[in-house]
Image (cartoon, rainbow, N blue to C red):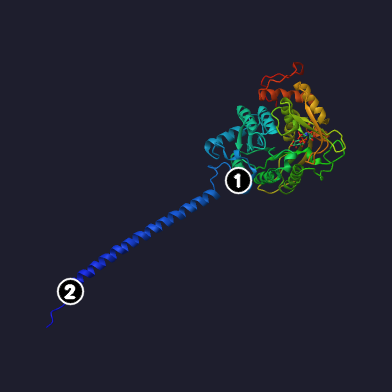
Amino acid sequence: MASPPDTSKSIKLERYNSYLRRIHSTKLLNASSKLLFRVTLLIALVLILFFTINYPPLSDTPHHVPTHYHSFLSTNFFTSSSAIGGAAWEKQVRHSATPRRQNGMSVLVTGAAGFIGAHCSLALKKRGDGVLGLDNFNSYYDPSLKRSRQDLLVKHQIFIVEGDLNDGPLLTKLYDVVTFTHILHLAAQAGVRYAMQNPQSYVASNIAGFVNLLEVAKVANPQPAIVWASSSSVYGLNTDVPFSESHRTDHPASLYAATKKAGEEIAHTYNHIYGLSLTGLRFFTVYGPWGRPDMAYYFFTKAILQGKTIDVYQTQDEKEVARDFTYIDDVVKGCLGALDTAEKSTGSGGKKRGPAQLRTYNLGNTSPVPVGGLVSILESLLNIKAKKHVIKMPLNGDVPFTHANVSLAYRDFGYKPTTDLLTGLRKFVKWYVGYYEIQPRIKKENGVNTSNPKISA
Ligand SMILES: O=C(O)[C@H]1O[C@H](OP(=O)(O)OP(=O)(O)OC[C@H]2O[C@@H](n3ccc(=O)[nH]c3=O)[C@H](O)[C@@H]2O)[C@H](O)[C@@H](O)[C@@H]1O
């Protein structure tokens, strides 16, 4: 009989093989679960990144503007330090916007760190109205000047929210915190000639930004009354003088003028459909202390002090170019007059409930001065002869002259400009030399001294 096979060896081998299989499968399991874990982690990270970029929380990001607007905004735009939406922020917003007089207004001033915006904010605050500023502090001109204006406003308890008109959620947030009775909308891309260099910035601010503001205002309950900055440039190549509100405004000479004209048409639409009370103010070359460095009176002053040549424009037929230069204090009175006589909007819940006020006014000085005259006044105030380069006006959007008829503004809110160009420029030069700490050869008899002057709003 054959001896039975020795199974003990094969059993051992089988056990060993099964042990190896178990180890192998455990390893496999470990490896695959690690892989699964890593993939899950990666997906989670990608998802977090995606949602952070596309849906940033309002409280953490003060400036979540649609990406297609980013190219129009300044680098400063992203450097605000205060977290928007927090309790401390809301307290500041409320405090700034609360009126201190009976039946006072609560006004949202856009462009509050700008020239006219800063002056109007101070004037409103001084008489007891509540003011909240909004400004994106862009770098169209030296932002440090805007910061200095902001410092001045802060001293008068006016808070400026750093944000852009195109930031819908931010505007909505402001409305959640404050019931504004009025908006004084002065934020804009200004300047006639710059429109040839950066046309998109005009569309972004003056058209898209304005529409965004109106979209938020139309659904507010109650809707605010809105007073906003149009421009004398809408008269374009108009030859009827003085310019009256009933004159043609359909032949603008610059894209800037075209966007302001578009603003007037847009205002008509929101008044017609939603019952928003809207008043457009056509400003005529506003100048004065804390002014805009991109404007001729300002950069002429700088150039004359530095002994640099200035270009003085003439028309193509060698006539003088003239402007109805308007002093800031007069314009501030006009803005406040327009706010005071603005009727309430009639809509609610985004629907019109009755006809609402729609107005347009010239705010000018009514006495045009040739650019040569402006230069002569500056020469005499600075006691320096300007190096003039008289050239034909380039085709850059400029118009040959402006001249306002202001009888409508006088009739409706007593607007009456009282500052002539010499008086206004004297105040400007006094401020300029103080602000930039310049010691020019200024004649004492011109009444200009180098002490640091205060804003005169
Ligand atoms: O009235 C208005 O609506 C407009 O007024 C100004 O525009 P503008 O009148 O052209 O003011 P400046 O740029 O300061 O020019 C004043 C005058 O100086 C002339 N100029 C300008 C620049 C220059 O190098 N040389 C020169 O002679 C211009 O042709 C103009 O007649 C503002 O810049 C606009 O934002 C505003 O909307």
Q: Amino acid at mark 1?
A: Val
Residue drawn 25% across and 68% down? Answer: 17
Give percent across and percent down for residue 310. Answer: 76, 31
- Numbered marks: total: 2
Residue 379 visible, this angle: yes
Mark 1 = which residue?
Answer: 65
Closer to the camera in the image, 133 or 310: 310
Quarter holding the C terminus? top right
Secondary structure found at label 1? loop
Q: Which residue is mark 2?
A: 7
Residue furthest to the bottom: 1
Quadrant in which ligand 1 is drawn: top right
The structure residue drawn at horizontal position 80% and vertical position 43%, both measured from the top left corner, is: 253
What is the x, y in percent for residue 43? 46, 55
Amino acid on which disc 2 is placed: Thr
Q: Residues within 10 Å of mark 2 (few under 14, many from 20)?
A: few
Q: Is residue 440 left or right of residue 15?
A: right
Residue 281: quadrant of the picture: top right
Label at residue 135: none
The residue that appears at 75% across and 32% down in the rendered structure is 296
Alpha carbons under labels 1 and 2: distance apart: 80 Å
Q: Identify whether 374 is placed above or below 33.
A: above
Q: Is residue 415 left or right of residue 24?
A: right
Q: Residues within 10 Å of mark 1 (few under 14, many from 20)?
A: some
Label 2 sits on a secondary structure element that is: helix
Q: The N terminus lies in which quarter of the figure?
A: bottom left
Mark 1 vs mark 2, foreground winner is 2
Residue 288 visible somewhere in the drawing? no
Give residue 119's position: percent from left, percent from top.
69, 30
User: For residue 155, what is the image quadrant?
Assistant: top right
Residue nearest the observer in this picture, 176 or 195: 195
Q: Residue at x 73, y 23 (%)?
A: 427
